[in-house]
Amino acid sequence: MNTETKKDDYKELESRFDEIGRLGYMSALIGWDSRVCAPQDAGEEQGEQMAYLSMKQHEIMTRPDWKEMFDRLEKRTDLNDWQQANVREAKQEWIRETALPEALVEQSAKTANAGQSAWVKAKADSDFKSFAPHLQKLVAVARETAAALSAKTGQKPYDALLDMYQPGMTSDKLDVLFNDLKEFLPDFIKEAQKQNVGGQIEPFKGDYPLEKQTEFAKRLMQTMGFDFNRGRMDMSSSAFQTTCGKDDMRVVGRYDLDNPLRSVSAIMHETGHGMYEQGLPKEHMLQPVGKPRGMALHESQSLLMQGPVLQSNEFIRYLSKQMNEFYKTDECSVEHLTKQMHSVQPSLIRINADEATYPLHVIMRYELEKDLINGDLEVKDLPKAWNAKMKEYLGVEPKNDKEGCLQDIHWAAGNFGYFPDYTVGAIAAAQFFEAAKKQVPEIPRQLEKGDFSGLKSWLNENVHSQASKLSFNDLIKKATGKELSTEAFKNSLRERYLGGKSEKTSVRSAALLQAKTAAER
């Protein structure tokens, strides 16, 4: 093959993924619109539009000449590091996509759309029985997807689903991390409860209207370094972030009229997601190599802001001053914010769980969905199995389906294999923050002044700008000097809730510890 033909191969690959990427942005825009401002009756048509865009992407990915193109590209010696990584990532996407027949891709999109609509009503009515037939279809589609991917890749069926959200993740790796936390957390939670800030936590009594929370959230995003020339912010009753273009990162915050800290927590979480997207190398963003390095890494960027940063003593002092001045109140004192945020208490609802109990919410979902996919648990038995694990792991038991197995939208949307990424992300976040502070010691002092420059620069250099050039494991090891482990996460919990000390730590000392928010994850 002559040189010109070889160049055309790589240009053709880039051209195809440019088109796939733009179709993905269109789909993301419809998804954002459906959750923020679309008319109530637009849901069915929007679902059809998204299914159509998915099919167009699938058609490109299943063209018959991909294999020969990859065979030629993998023999090239003139591609730079980014180009070689792009070929690698593109081939992995092609392998996953060609494992799925077109009928299954279309069925998956339609089943998820119908499942989410059914879930909304079923949750409102706390009626699992009405949702069960939809979940049965969703599980069947997920099992078929897992089997098809497994046959193509040689992975275990459930591992194939995990790999869709965080490439390289396996149940064996998760079992090592999660079993360690299952052994550590129960005793830690009991000890931390003894160190909870003493007394009854006083509720906020001031006036915190939506428009004021919205303005404060925007100011906080600017402080963190979010570029509003490349993004926007809206407020809703639920928080999320989505990217609709190279310069179009959309953040949706969550408001709580009775507790402005929940608004702060949610917006810092979603801004962490948005800043990661804004930090990706723009020249590669439509290509596989320019995408985020999986959802566990994505969650690490949001949880780092919502956890180690928001909960640091230094940032709490900054936040207290800003909130008091902005809301013209004196109730947002450091002491009050600390009492509001620092508490360990097992509870029923995942998104309101504290940092110490949250991993157990995730672990039980991981175990349940793995059993659903592997055929060890049937849909009809899910509520009973859910309640039993809640009782075993957290010592609480749901009174109804709404506060039990209907509380999350993930399975209704067909997202089996996603839940573990929340806790893997929290583990990685602690490890990143620990490494950042070692390499840039002034970060804590900067945060006390509302200065994110040191932390943002470190994250941009070591995480954001790397996109998918490296594997998940290699990126973490390069950035932190260590393999991913629970060590930093457990140390951060000990420091935050126990001051690094034993259960004899005084209540007075505990009151000075870093804060924990019981807000949306």
Image: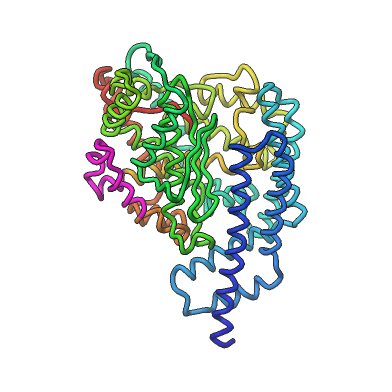
Picture coordinates of residue 439, whole percent (x, y): 25, 50
Q: Quadrant of residue 365?
A: top right
Q: Residue furthest bottom?
A: 2
What residue is drawn where x is 57% and y is 37%?
366
Position above or below: 510 against 110: above
Picture coordinates of residue 364, whole percent (x, y): 56, 32
Q: Determine if the magenta segment contains residue 359.
A: no
What residue is drawn where x is 40% and y is 26%?
261
If the image is split into quadrants, where does the N terminus sit? bottom right
Magenta-colored span: 434-460
Whether residue 326 is visible: yes
Could you say which is closer to the camera, residue 214 or residue 66?
214
Q: Quadrant of residue 193?
A: top left
Position above or below: 481 against 372: below
Picture coordinates of residue 190, whole percent (x, y): 40, 21
Position above or below: 44 against 56: above
Dominant secondary structure, magenta: helix
Could you say which is closer to the camera, residue 191 or residue 357?
357
The answer to whether residue 521 is left or right of residue 404 is left
What residue is drawn where x is 47% and y is 79%?
78
The answer to whether residue 262 is left or right of residue 317 is right
Whether residue 195 is visible: no
Picture coordinates of residue 40, whole percent (x, y): 69, 33
What residue is drawn where x is 63% and y is 23%?
402
Q: Determine if the magenta segment contains residue 440.
A: yes
